[in-house]
Amino acid sequence: MDSGIIEITQLSKTYKDILAVDHLDLVIPANCIYGFLGPNGAGKSTTLRMMLSLISPDNGIIKVFGKDLNQHRKQILSRIGSIIEKPDFYLYLTGIENLNLLARLSGIRPNSKKIEELLDLVGLSSRGKHKVGTYSHGMKQRLGIAQAIIHDPRLVILDEPTTGLDPSGILELRQMILNLKQAGKTVILSSHILSEIELIADHMVIMNRGKALVQGNVQTLINDQELVVVIETNNTPLAVEKIRNNWPVLGAEAISPTELQCQAPKALIADINKFLLEGGIDVYSIYYKRKLEDYFFKLTSN
Amino acid sequence: MLTLIRTELYKIARRPRSYIGFAAILLIVGIIEFALYIDGASYIDFIFQQLEGFLSIEGNVLNGYLVCFIILQTLIIQMPLLVALITGDLISGEAANGTLRLLLTRPVSRSELVFAKFTAGSFYVLILLLLLGVLSLSGSLLLFGEGDLIILKSETINVLKGSDVLWRFYGAFVIAFLSLSVVSSFSLMLSCFTDNSIGPIIITMAVIVIFTIIGSFDLPLFDHIKPFLFTSYMIVWRNMFDQPIDWGLMGTSIAILVIHIVLFLSISLYYFNRKDIHS
Amino acid sequence: MIFGISILMNKATGQKAENLVQMIQTDFKKIERYTADINISFEIPYINIDPVKGKVYFKQPNLFKVKTEGIAFMPKQNPFYFMELLNDPSSYLCIDSGSETNPGSIIRIIQLVPKEHEELILAKIWVDATRRRIVKSSLTTKSNGTVEIQYLYDEKPGSKLPELMVFGIEVGKFKIPKMMSADLNSRSKNSGAPSQSTHGKIRLKFTNYRLNQSFDEKVFYK
């Protein structure tokens, strides 16, 4: 395997009888946005916690920045920022006090100007002096991002960072992540919102039952797949029959009384539309399913 | 390490719960001093009524030293609770609140974290004892004046000269600090085992109460157990008021208390370094 | 010289008890009041206490108060309780109970039985008839039992006030409730293994007597 910012070799972790992570091999390249995907219980959180040494593996090696995590833990963690699960803080301290405290523990002297800039960046400049106990979930999420980057880490691990954010917040976060990448950082993003991963991630791994099913460049992985086209008509059974007769390889099938789906390259969609209209079938809408979503469900359902 | 200790002290200082202990001491000491100020004479008469048939007592019996001693005696159970309320929560409370993973994803070693929390907890104990000392000793001396200290044992009475008392109180406070450090290290150890905030506090108190009850029964069966109970050595501060002081026993007790602290801390370090953080 | 001493001794044994008591009373009444410095030491079972310094105050007929710098245990008996009785010879029966011989003196033993007294049951005194001073007393009262007091004097001629008073007391065994005791759960050897004896002594050593000098009498009532 090519070396990356994180190299995981034969990583395993068992809880009682459950193999949470099963001989995982993973390479995360530097200076990219890396998507971590998988259904619940796939082993994503366990893997991320092992990367942050919150959990010790039963077997395997984790190397970060080329160093063994087991032996260079403090040095490695000083260059990582993270949000794992929901962001929790000291509720009896203000946002600024929390950031000050965490900055000190990360080995940097807190700079009030920098903290102000950071709060401004995450949209909390007016709430910095309020106790975190008064924050909404979305505000805590924003503060979580602030604490993850306060010490200018080289690697940022974000587990479900968009949870609790409103649409504008999600947009801002997306831009922030892209800016982090542009600043030369590596961002590991674990998310259930597949569209987000598809939109911004460069590389990804899809895990299931503790194993990595696929890993690699996002576009390369999903462009190998054909589009799944969904067509809404006034006579779906007839439309399915006609498409099957004309293009048997498309695998047309009804998915509801009014919709059918088939796999077709983009270039064929206009022809299918014209064919149905000439056949006397009204077409109400044509759209294609998210590539990644479909790819994900196909992989993880097997 | 210093940064960690300062951080832990800062968190303790900013936490509202930390001030329960101070408020409790203020209240308890205030109530006792007030009550004795108003009604202390009849309390003394009640205590010495058995002697009244053949002896009378001259001098200022109800003085600041006696009041301080009475206060310290009554706080035997309360002080460990007030300590455990804070130290029992130092790790498990963070786990329950989710801030433990916040700390452990920072470049801090788990051992350093345990030591820092123990140090901060010990500092809290020290401040608590200082407050107790100032209120109970200085406050009592101001209200009741100086005098000889009369110590009642179950079958004897010791009278210590006023000039010979103050250093004994200082020694008692030092031993009390050690004793409460055992409580603090014990509750911190329990705190490592669980992600539940209240469990270690309750278990610490239950253990102390049960051990103290066993220690107070003069049954042959319990006599075999008593030497192994750390609570048996926690009350050795009272021996600072013996005449003469059994320095051998003091030394042994102090050593056993220190051994308990080291033992509980060692277990904490061993377990916490291996623990998977799921909270 | 032997003849002189034997004459004196004959004179001493020959005196009637009542007369001897009255002579002591007369001598005693010459001292209206006094104060003195005292050093009190204790040998009391179950009580460990170092010597204590203080002052003693006396005013006729029987006001006696000890004021100490620290805590002290004093017998409940006032040693001069019976002296008030002696003011009125008709208020008591005087019984001559014989005599003892000490080197250089004859000690007369006299019992004083009050005819009517609210507190005093019996006063037994040992009187040095030669020097006309009490060397020992045993006072029995209703509320405080019997206290024996020894009086030791310095060798100055005519010295009527004791240099040392030794109170002998009987101490009952006491038990402090466990919750008040400071040795609950104690592992100390010095928890206070009590002695078996019940007899104790309190010694008052008098120095620096100040006779018939005024002092604040509130001291007797505080």
Image: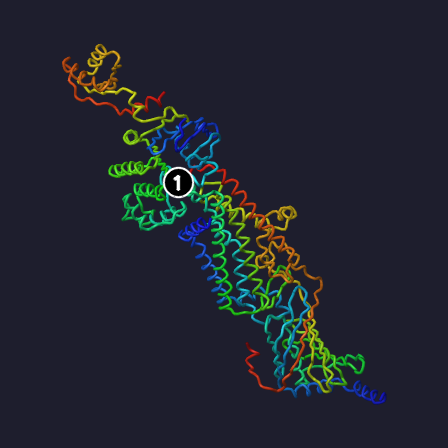
- The residue most toward the top is A245
Q: Which residue is mark 1?
A: A79
Label 1 resides on the chain identified as: A
* Residue C105 image position (x, y, % from top left): 79, 83
Q: Quadrant of residue B20?
A: bottom left
Label 1 SS: loop
Q: Is residue B213 above or below residue A71?
A: below
Q: Locate residue B211 relative to residue A168 in the image: left or right.
A: right
Q: Locate residue B54 relative to residue B126 in the image: left or right.
A: right
The disc labelled 1 sits on which kind of residue?
A: Arg
* Residue A153 image position (x, y, % from top left): 37, 40
* Residue A94 image position (x, y, % from top left): 34, 49
* Residue A76 image position (x, y, % from top left): 42, 39
Residue B259 appears in the picture as rendered: yes
Q: Is residue A229 above or below residue A127?
A: above
Q: Locate residue A225 relative to residue B122 in the image: left or right.
A: left
Q: Is residue C110 above or below residue B221?
A: below
Q: Quadrant of residue A215?
A: top left
Image quarter (top left, top right, bottom left or bottom right) of the C terminus of chain A: top left
**Of C129 and A2, which appears nearest the observer?**
A2
Q: Which class describes the residues within 10 Å of circle 1: few (<14), some (14-19), or many (20+)?
A: some
**Of B56 and A72, which appears nearest the observer?**
A72
Q: Residue at x 33, y 51 (%)?
A: A112
Image quarter (top left, top right, bottom left or bottom right) of the N terminus of chain A: top left
Residue C116 appears in the picture as rendered: no
**Of B28 and B268, which appears nearest the observer?**
B268
